Every structure is written in structure tokens, then in C-alpha cells.
Amino acid sequence: MNLTTDILKVQKEFGKCAKDCFYFATHYVYTFDQSRGQKSLVPEWDYVEMILNEIAIPGDLYLEKSRDMMVSWTVMIYFLHSMLFNENWAGFAISRKQDEVDDGGDNSTPESLFGRIKFMWQNLPFWMKPNFTFSHLKIKNKDTDSYCTGESANPNSGRNVACTFKFCDEFAFLPLNDQASINQAMRWGSYRTLLYVTTAKQGTLAETISREGKGFKKIQIPWHLRPDKDKAWYEKKSAGAIGNEVAEELDISYAPRGTEKVVAQYWDASEQIIDPDDMLPAGQYERIACGMDYGFIRSAVEFAGLYQNTWYVFHEIYEYEKTPDEMTALINHIRQSIGIDFAVFCGKDRPDLLKSLSMGGFVATGFQEPVGVRMGTIISVFKTKRIKIIGTATGLLTEIPRYRRHKEGGVVVDAPHRHDVDEAMDAIGYLFMGAGEHANAGEWESEWDDNPYELLESHGKDWSADGWELNIQKHNFRWINEYSR
């Protein structure tokens, strides 16, 4: 290979890296595993690519994760890439302690955020390595005038900082009394993207953001997305845990771990999470249905197909602060993309959604029923291992370990806990109820035997434009159908 060919190859690679942060990371960036004392190229894991794509979009982002998911490394990869390939890019980072941001400037180690940038920079090929300078709490690329600065978290962090990207690591573990002030300060200064990363911690502002949104887009990175973690790994970690460590560090749950976990005890992520490439084509399912739980803060829609007596959740919509029209547009888009009629089951109080979902050739239904029956129905499906979930349905997968019973006056009742994030679980409950799974609910079995889905099938698809309504009064169950051509 001659010199001209070498130069052209380098230019081509440099261009590829500039356009694609994930390509750059998986071909040229080395991280360091402190526990093993070894360095390795960034693995080609789907969730790493997803994080890099998400944080490249302007906005306020809240990323909650299981422990040891390489998320902080991934964010620092984004910092390195941005400073390397962009002019005048500016980043700002905070964490609980100053040393967690930068533990030594030019002598920093991979124990700190900026030390990770330095380690990755040192291991770049010579033809890509920019002219970086490392001083305490500041890194600068002299070639592009891009830089990043940092500090320990305090009530005024970021207030007077104008930059491209603001980042707070371990948000839930900042001083509890300062979290609101830090959040206000970080969102006050000018920026393009704001990112909080954290594991779960009960009783924090992070829990409130997770539950209510507060203007953030939520991203969830549960442990099972990492290909080198399996059920055996989870059980080993759980065995040595104390208190709420499993709930907070692994399950991304703000609820205490214990006997209230009514679904997770029957769930095996290693066997029941399906790779998207292994999902059946829509045409092979015996039946397709959809469950929806709509809220003004957060809404969830779960799409599932029945095959050989097992439900396969093949798609999910999990959105914050969407209007009914926006949600129905998303659902109808899925309907059109798979080209198959299916029913949509939701709660009793969304007639606006039911009407807008009822379009030519499709059905929308809504019902109410004792929440104990719905919870029992969900448990019955999980207990018999009759559900498999696509790995990209992170809302549902993250809610599984959280789903627990509520307490009233100290007494546990058969209803979901009122303050938990459970929209995806409620949505899958509506789907199961609508599909007639309540008949298998065991001790929670209701007095009525009607299968809403079979009733829909028996009436066919030729109802009048005025629609029709069917009321079943047994056991306080009411099923409504709204349909228009």
C-alpha cells in the first residue's frame, strides 16, 4: 500500500467516525475495566448505540439505569467525539464529589469522568488523536476550540453556564436537600441538551421525575439489555444484596424489594425476553390485540400477538405528555404498518381515545372491572410463563419488578400501588382482560364468563356508523364498544 492510498484510507475512516459516533466508539475507542484491570474496545451492543443516538437529540433527558451498564463511559464517549469532530462544542459535567468528575487533571484516572476521556484519548490511533490539554476540571481540544468543564454538585451548579451539553451523573444520589435547587440551576443556563443519569433511589426528586416526567424525556437502561448479563448473574448479585440494593441498583425500582413483588417472582428475563430479529411475523399470530393506559403525564400502549397459547409483546409505545390525538396517531400508524385488524382495549374513562381509534375496519373497546381481577389476570399469565416480550419494550420490562400491591390502612389489597409507575403493566392488563384471560385468574376469577375479544369476532366488522354498546353488569364489569366506518 502506497502513501497516497494510506492517506485516502485515513481520510475515509475519519469521515466515517465524524458522522457516526457508534462506529467511532466500536472501532477506535478503548475503555478500561477497573475490576479486571484490562482495556477493551467498546462492544457493539444495541443499547449503547441507542444511548448515543438519544443524547445527540436536543432536549432534557432523564436516563435511569441498572448499575454497571457502562452508561457513564458512554456519555464520556459522546463528550470525546463531540470535542474531536466539532468546533466550539462545550460540555459541562457535575457529580456528587469533585473527584468523581476529575481526580487529577493531567494525572486523572478512569475512576473519574474526565479521567475516562483522557484514557480513551490516549488510546486513539496517532492519526486521529487531537491536541488535547488536560487541566483540573477542564479538557480542551486546541485544534477545534471545543472543551468541557466540570465541578462538584452544588445548589448553583450550571446556573451561569452557557454550553452545548450539560450532564449530571448519579442525580438521585446528590444531597437530598439540594436536588431541587440543582435541577433548577442546571435548567436555567442556556444549553442544547441536558442529561441526568442515575440508578433509582426512593424518596428523591429523581423518583418524582421518573413518575411524573417534569418536562424530561425518560430513557431506561435495565440490566438485561447488556448481553453479558443473564439470570445467573442477577441471582448472584441478588444473593449478596442487603436492604433495597436489588430494587435500586438492578431493578430500577423505587419500591422496596420484598414479598410485594407480585409479578417479578414469576419472571425470567433470560428466557422470556425475545430479540427483535426472533419475533414472529405479524401474519403468523392467531390473534393480535393492543392494551393502552393513557395518562396526561405518561401513556403506555402494548401490542401483542397470541401464538400457541403464549402472548408475544412485539411492540410498545411509551410516551410522556402526549395528547389523545398524538397517541391515537401513533397507534394507528402501527395498525397501518402491520396491515392487520386488531382490537384496542383501554380503561373506562377514555371515550375520546376510543372514538378516534375507531376507524374503518378496526375496533376500539374500553371497559372497567375490579382492579383485583385485572391484577390476578396479569399474575396468572406471568405465573404460567405465557408471555414473552421484545427486548425493546423497555417500559414494560422496567415496570415488571416494580409492580406490587397497594396498602390501605396497613392492609395489602389486590390493587396496584397507587404511587408506582405502572402504565405499561396496566396496559398489558387491559389487553389480557380484553382477550379473555380473566377466565384463568384463579382466586381472582370474576363471576362473568364473557370473552370481549370473542364477542367482537362474533359481531364481525360490519357494524353501523352509529356504533353499539354492550353492557355486562355482572361483577361490576362494563364493556363499551365505539365504532364508526
Image (spheres, rainbow, N blue to C red):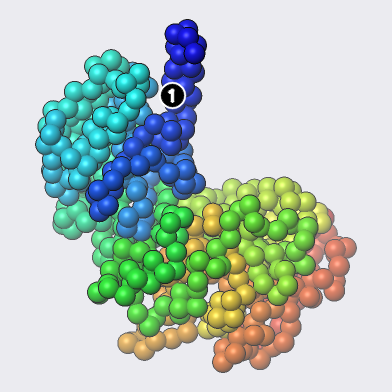
- Quadrant housing the C terminus: bottom right
Determine if residue 145 is in view: no
Q: Is residue 265 left or right of residue 248?
A: right
Could you say which is closer to the camera, residue 345 or residue 229? 229
Q: Residue at x 68, y 47 (%)?
A: 333
Residue plotted at (74% across, 57% down): 282
| Residue 98 seen | yes
Dividing the picture into quadrants, the one containing residue 385 is bottom right
Q: 9 above or below 280?
A: above
Front-lying residue, 202 or 107: 107
Q: Residue at x 25, y 53 (%)?
A: 35
Looking at the image, residue 341 lies above or below residue 194: below
Q: Residue at x 63, y 89 (%)?
A: 446
**Location of residue 200 by image quarter:** bottom left
- Count of numbered marks: 1
Residue sitting nearer the eye, 223 or 476: 223
Residue 178 coordinates in the image, percent (x, y): 16, 52
Residue 326: image location, x then y, percent: 59, 48
In the displayed image of the protein, which residue is found farthest to the front?
A: 1
Q: Position of residue 430 (x, y in %)?
A: 61, 71
114 lies above or below 320 = above
Q: Mark 1 Cα within 10 Å, few/some/many (few <14, many 20+)?
A: some
Identify residue type, mark 1: Ala
Q: Quadrant of residue 359?
A: bottom right
Measured as percent of width and height from the top left, residue 389 is found at 58, 63
Q: Nearer the viewer, residue 310 or 171?
A: 310
Q: Which residue is mark 1?
A: 18
Q: Is residue 139 left or right of residue 447?
A: left
Q: At numbered mark 1, what does the secondary structure look like: helix, strand or loop?
A: helix
